[in-house]
Amino acid sequence: MDMEKVKKLQQMMDQSQNIVFFGGAGVSTESGIPDFRSQDGLYNQKYPYPPETILSRTFYEKHPDWFFRFYREKMLCLEARPNAAHKKLAELEQKGRLSAVITQNIDGLHTAAGSRCVLELHGSVHRNYCQKCGALYDAEWMLRQTDIPVCTCGGRVKPDVVLYEESLDSRTLDRSVRAIARADMMIIGGTSLAVYPAAGLVRYFQGKYLVILNRDATQMDEQASLCLREPIGQVLSQIHV
């Protein structure tokens, strides 16, 4: 752990009044949820189709059996629990220091940790709805299904997650833009900033401190005030609120 960089992070946070956190899959890896692009991530699992294809709207419509098999086996990690990063972000919000968590994750762990203003750009596995009547089902119900999930009305139940070829929710995007534009500090954690349009939100930040906590280099490193490569939970657990 580079404690000099952690000290700088602490100083920046102490000088900031409105912090926004923008996170991706790397936030949840310490909770045991694999990310999408690491050597052991979902994109390197062996399936008859690549994950990018399976998680597309076209594939969902044409091959729902394969889609739901993959979804239940690889996307529903319901035993995972919030880690030190999730908990520290919730604490920062409770102390009035952090105004929003903007996440590309669909695991619901920020909410489970106690964060209240969580903007889920890609939806959540904990919300599932009937495409015919709109009835809602939770993730536990979805996990218990053994085939294509069907509502009592006969309609197909779809996870409320954004698939490839689908648009992000406009209200969530608008709220994210406003939160970033108002922030005086933005912490980017656990994301390669490669997935658009979510990654494009960073350009709305006009504040003082931009910090990147990510294992690998990102396209924003040169513009950042500080970059750390250590696991996010290990870094944030050193921060005093």
Image (cartoon, helix red, strand yellow):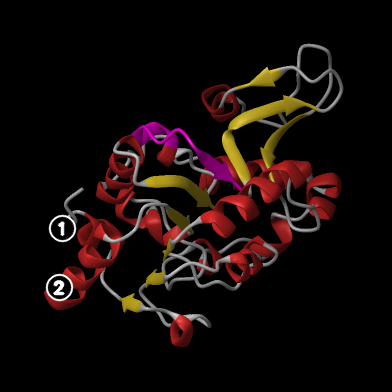
Q: What secondary structure is found at the residue carrying circle 2?
A: loop
Q: Residues within 10 Å of mark 2 (few under 14, many from 20)?
A: few
Cβ atoms under marks 2 and 1 closer than 8 Å: yes
Q: Farthest residue in the top direction?
A: 152
Q: Amino acid at mark 1?
A: Gln
Identify the residue shown where x is 27% and y is 65%: 231
Q: Farthest residue in the bottom direction?
A: 222
Of the numbered discs 2 and 1, the one sitting upstream in the chain is 2
Q: CA distance from mark 2 to mark 1?
A: 10 Å
Q: Quadrant of residue 29?
A: bottom left
Is residue 179 one of those drawn in magenta? no
Identify the residue shown where x is 55% and y is 66%: 205
Q: Is residue 219 above or below residue 98?
A: below
Identify the residue shown where x is 44% and y is 83%: 221
Residue 123 coordinates in the image, percent (x, y): 63, 42
Q: Amino acid at mark 2?
A: Met
Q: Is residue 194 above or below residue 65?
A: below
Q: Residues within 10 Å of mark 1 (few under 14, many from 20)?
A: some
Q: Is residue 200 above or below residue 241?
A: below
Query: Exactly how many numbered labels are in the figure?
Result: 2
Q: Quadrant of the N terminus?
A: bottom left
* Left or right: 158 in relation to 26: right
* Left or right: 206 in relation to 51: left
Identify the residue shown where x is 69% and y is 54%: 55
> Magenta residues?
111-120
Residue 75 coordinates in the image, percent (x, y): 54, 46
Q: What secondary structure is found at the residue carrying circle 1?
A: loop
Q: Quadrant of residue 164?
A: bottom right
Residue 80 coordinates in the image, percent (x, y): 36, 40
Residue topped by disc 1 = 238
Residue 218: mark: none
Residue topped by disc 2 = 1
